[in-house]
Amino acid sequence: MLILHFLYKNNKIIVKFDPAILMVLLFFPLFRILVPIEFPKFQHMIGDPYVYAAILNDYAEAGMPLYPRIIFRVIWGIGSIILGMYFLKQMLSFRCIQKRYSKDVSYHVLQKFQTIKNTDKTICLKYLPGIASPILTGLRKPVIYLPSDLSQENNLYYILLHEYTHWKEKDLWLKLAVVILKILFWWNPIVWIIARDVERFIEIRCDKNATAHLDETEKLCYAETMLNIAKRNLGHSKISSALGMSQNLGTLSLKQRFLYLLNSTTTYAKYSLRTLTSLLLAFLVIVLSYYFLVQPSWDTPVEELWDEGTDFVADSSNSYLVEQLDGSYLFYMGDDPPTSAPSEEVKEGLYSDYPIIKADKTQ
């Protein structure tokens, strides 16, 4: 996730990919977080005697008591509840403002919108005082809210086009998924960073699709409108349940959106070699993250191995495995008779400290 985040800061990389593909690439590490399952017969254990050991070894030596896990789960749950209530309160407060202060738009605005709208689906248009920029809200009953003091009547077409494209692309559902992700993993700063990247690419994809049928002059007017809306939006907080033409996502987001518009002649092949290679590499990284499992480990001190009363301790100097012709193993420990070692345990690395000798075919 961090690698993708820093790669996405590079504008030269960004303009070479379709924004939808960039969001798909973010899905892979998010999937790894949401599905933390293990495959014991498939995984390779990597012992970490430093970081993980420092965190977990004392816990393991204490017998892995239950109460620390309960405490962490309670903290996790309380944090998710508090953040969920915060987002819910923000949404309900905005809904109350909508009902109390929204007004019908002028006939001129409705006429502009009719030149964009190509569906029978009803989308309401309302004026709402107090908002800095136009926004789209409502999953089931979509409404486009315009600032009541909006003076950019000449560029109203591009404003409505942007918000309508958000609705057509079902971006509000994607925004809801981002909010839920932040509620569930509120304690993980990387998730918040990637959530911000997803919101940025939602806007970039919307710009790309909204301007697909515009000529160069119209795209410049669209970019000018976007810049004017960004100026109006300075110092205003964004609404988590809404989408706007220029949300407070930072200068990097605005710069990359302009770059996409300026490189509008570039065609993004969804099945190009570059795209397929990137998707394959992302998939491979996720597979490897499931295969290599890092666990805490430590070397038992020699004085503990040879404690008083210890008769014999098996190690690589006095014990070994013999691989039989049929694939099974015999474990030789000192002068004791050999015992059978299950091949599954050998493959899982439980006997990795002992050398393996192949049986002589003549025997």
Image (cartoon, grey):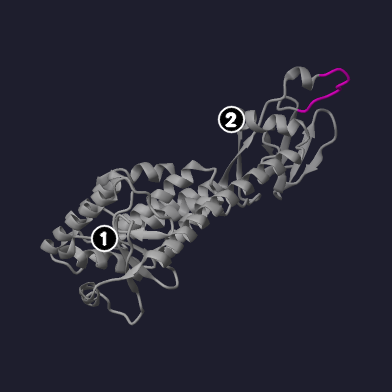
Is 337 or 167 nearer to us in this picture? 167
Q: Position of residue 315 (x, y in %)?
A: 73, 27
User: Is 331 on the left-hand or right-hand side of 287?
Assistant: right
User: Is 24 on the left-hand or right-hand side of 148?
Assistant: right
Q: Which residues are magenta?
A: 307-314
What SS does tag 1 mark?
helix
Q: Which mark is residue 51?
A: 2
Q: Amino acid at mark 2?
A: Val
Q: CA distance from mark 1 to mark 2?
A: 44 Å
User: Relative to residue 212, is residue 273 depicted above or below?
Assistant: above
Residue at 40% across / 58% down in the picture? 24
Residue at 42% across / 61% down in the picture? 97
Q: Position of residue 41 (x, y in %)?
A: 65, 50
Q: How many marks?
A: 2
What SS does tag 2 mark?
helix
Residue at 72% across / 24% down in the picture? 300
Tell me the residue that label 1 is attached to.
207
User: Relative to residue 285, is residue 270 depicted above or below?
Assistant: below
